[in-house]
Image (tube, rainbow, N blue to C red):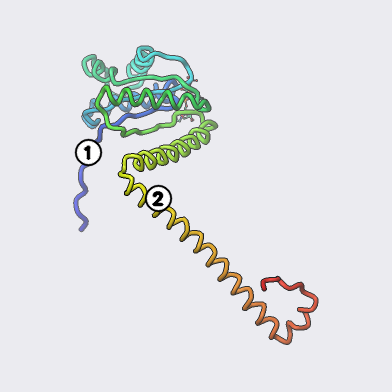
């Protein structure tokens, strides 16, 4: 029999909703998170950062969210609970195809995380039109790559010069090894082609055709 599964412990995090000013966020997402809070399954520390093109203040977004909860929530709104919930709702404006929007989102995220003492544990929810999803995902891919590069380079700068040198040497060895492997594979392929060519040359049935076929020029 398998081991009993561990209960899931919700971790402090920030939910970033792209399309947070839209219908899905108002009708489903925010009411769903509010219900999780009432059900006691939200982590003790959390935040929601909504983004959309409309310029909205945090207060205006909180009002839209409140309307959504009043209208669509499974459980009724409770003033005391709502007061605690809404101070964790934030909004920043930006278009998905505008690089500046991502800088603004990151800056706002870092500020919220610092104020609420949240770790950089982020969930991204795309509540945007299907036609905008590929662009947003591509941006995330590039941003992830850039942040990995940044982390690597800042780690290198923090290291002692000797360690940094060792890492650079190791990287060079790996790069050289990859190049050697690639050359090796090429030589192996050339060897196979040569052996093939020699075998065909020895085959009397092939000799006749060989005069007509150009040599593959491997020698
Ligand atoms: N509504 C539902 O009940 C429901 C149910 C299931 C699935 N969905 C899916 O959920 C997604 C959102 O639907 P929705 O009904 O919420 O649509 P919506 O009301 O039109 O909202 C779209 C959201 O995306 C934002 N947006 C659109 N283009 C953007 C861009 N270029 N840059 C930044 N933000 C942009 C809008 O921001 P601004 O308005 O501020 O410009 C708005 O917040 C769609 O993929 C839909 O198929 C919706």
User: Assess mark 1: CB under 8 A from ligand 1?
Assistant: no
Image: 22 above or below 214: above
Q: Residue furthest bottom?
A: 204
Q: Quadrant of residue 14?
A: top left
Q: CA distance from mark 2 to mark 1?
A: 40 Å
> On the image, numbered disc 1 is attached to which residue?
9
Q: Quadrant of residue 13?
A: top left
Q: Residue at x 52, y 31 (%)?
A: 132
180, 64: nearer the viewer: 180
Image: 180 above or below 76: below
Q: Quadrant of residue 51?
A: top left
Point out the image quarter for the C terminus.
Answer: bottom right
Image: 52 above or below 214: above
218, 84: nearer the viewer: 218
Rendered location of residue 38, percent (x, y): 23, 25
Rendered location of residue 48, percent (x, y): 33, 25
> On the image, numbered disc 2 is attached to which residue?
168
């Amino acid at each position: 029999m398998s081991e009993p599964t561990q209960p899931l412990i919700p971790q402090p995090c920030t939910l970033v909703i792209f399309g947070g000013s839209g219908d899905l966020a108002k009708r489903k997402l925010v009411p769903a998170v509010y219900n999780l809070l009432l059900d006691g399954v939200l982590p003790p520390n959390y935040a929601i950062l909504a983004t959309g093109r409309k310029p909205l203040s945090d207060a205006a977004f909180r009002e839209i969210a409140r309307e959504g909860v009043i209208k669509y929530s499974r459980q009724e709104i409770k003033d005391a609970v709502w007061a605690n919930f809404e101070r964790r709702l934030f909004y920043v404006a930006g278009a998905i195809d505008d690089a500046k929007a991502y800088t603004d989102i990151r800056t706002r995220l870092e500020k919220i995380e610092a104020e609420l003492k949240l770790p950089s544990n982020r969930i991204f929810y795309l509540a945007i039109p299907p036609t905008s999803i590929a662009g947003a995902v591509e941006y995330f891919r590039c941003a992830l790559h850039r942040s990995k590069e940044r982390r690597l380079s800042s780690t290198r700068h923090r290291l002692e010069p000797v360690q940094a040198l060792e890492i650079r040497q190791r990287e060079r060895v790996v790069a050289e090894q990859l190049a050697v492997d690639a050359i090796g594979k090429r030589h192996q392929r050339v060897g196979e082609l040569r052996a093939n060519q020699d075998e065909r040359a020895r085959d009397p049935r092939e000799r006749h055709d060989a005069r007509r076929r150009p040599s593959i020029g491997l020698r």
